[in-house]
Image (spheres, rainbow, N blue to C red):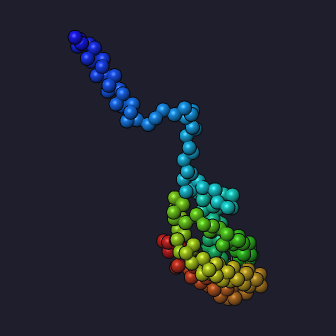
């Protein structure tokens, strides 16, 4: 006759056997190192060698430099006695600071990068138009710098208006919050 203790032991062994049969077979290999999680979008390295976050921050810094130059020109043109030298310096900086502008927007630096940006996805969907608008801006900024060097305030004002028009044209289609 089997006593109660033996019955409990047999039931426990049977239960463990069932659990073992239902689980994955034991591996003879050592456990592998945990796979590295894919980097977050803002940490992915772009062909530029920067992360998406770094690229967006660089782009935003350059655009702020351009904004500062435009503010200087605008403020001076509106003042009662414009500082032509300040206008000339600011206007000369625009073509320099905007060099390579199209390269500031590589794939992976749009809103899906996980970094706050006003760049709209259409930049990458309609790249040809985006690059044309940049080319228009660059041409207008070259004209602005050359015109400012001449010192004629009326001509500078007209060139500044033309350059600002190219900014607006691009912002209307390719930038949020404008």
* Res 119 seen here: yes
Residue at the location (68% across, 88% down)?
A: 154
Who's the residue at 34% across and 22% down the image? 13
Q: Could you tell me which quadrant the N terminus lies in?
A: top left
Relative to 146, does residue 37 appear above or below in the rendering? above
Asked whether 47 or 79 is in front, the reply is: 47
- Using the image as rendered, state which of residue 14 and residue 142 is in the foreground: 14
Q: Is residue 6 left or right of residue 51?
A: left
Above or below — where is 110 with respect to 8?
below
Q: Which residue does the image show at 68% across and 61% down from the upper left? A: 48
> Where is residue 103, by image quadrant?
bottom right
Residue 2, position as x, y percentages in the image:
24, 12
Judged left or right of residue 178, residue 155 is: right
Q: Determine the image quadrant of residue 71.
A: bottom right
Q: Position of residue 173 (x, y in %)?
A: 52, 79
| Residue depicted at x 30% and y 17% | 9
Residue 80 shows in this picture: no
Residue 57 x/y as whole percent: 61, 60
């Amino acid at each position: 006759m089997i006593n109660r203790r033996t019955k409990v032991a047999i039931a426990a062994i049977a239960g463990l056997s069932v659990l073992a049969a239902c689980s994955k077979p034991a591996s003879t290999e050592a456990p592998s190192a945990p796979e590295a999680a894919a980097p977050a979008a803002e940490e992915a390295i772009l062909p530029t060698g920067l992360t998406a976050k770094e690229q967006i921050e660089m782009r935003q810094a350059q655009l702020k430099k351009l904004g500062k130059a435009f503010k200087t020109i605008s403020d001076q043109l509106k003042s009662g006695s414009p500082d032509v030298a300040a206008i000339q310096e600011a206007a000369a900086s625009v073509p320099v600071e905007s060099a390579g502008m199209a390269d500031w927007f590589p794939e992976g630096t749009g809103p899906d990068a996980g970094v706050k940006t006003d760049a709209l996805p259409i930049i990458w969907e309609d790249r040809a138009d985006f690059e044309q608008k940049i080319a228009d801006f660059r041409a207008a900024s070259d004209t602005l710098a050359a015109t400012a060097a001449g010192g004629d305030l009326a001509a500078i004002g007209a060139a500044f208006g033309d350059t600002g028009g190219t900014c607006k044209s691009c912002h209307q289609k390719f930038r949020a919050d404008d």
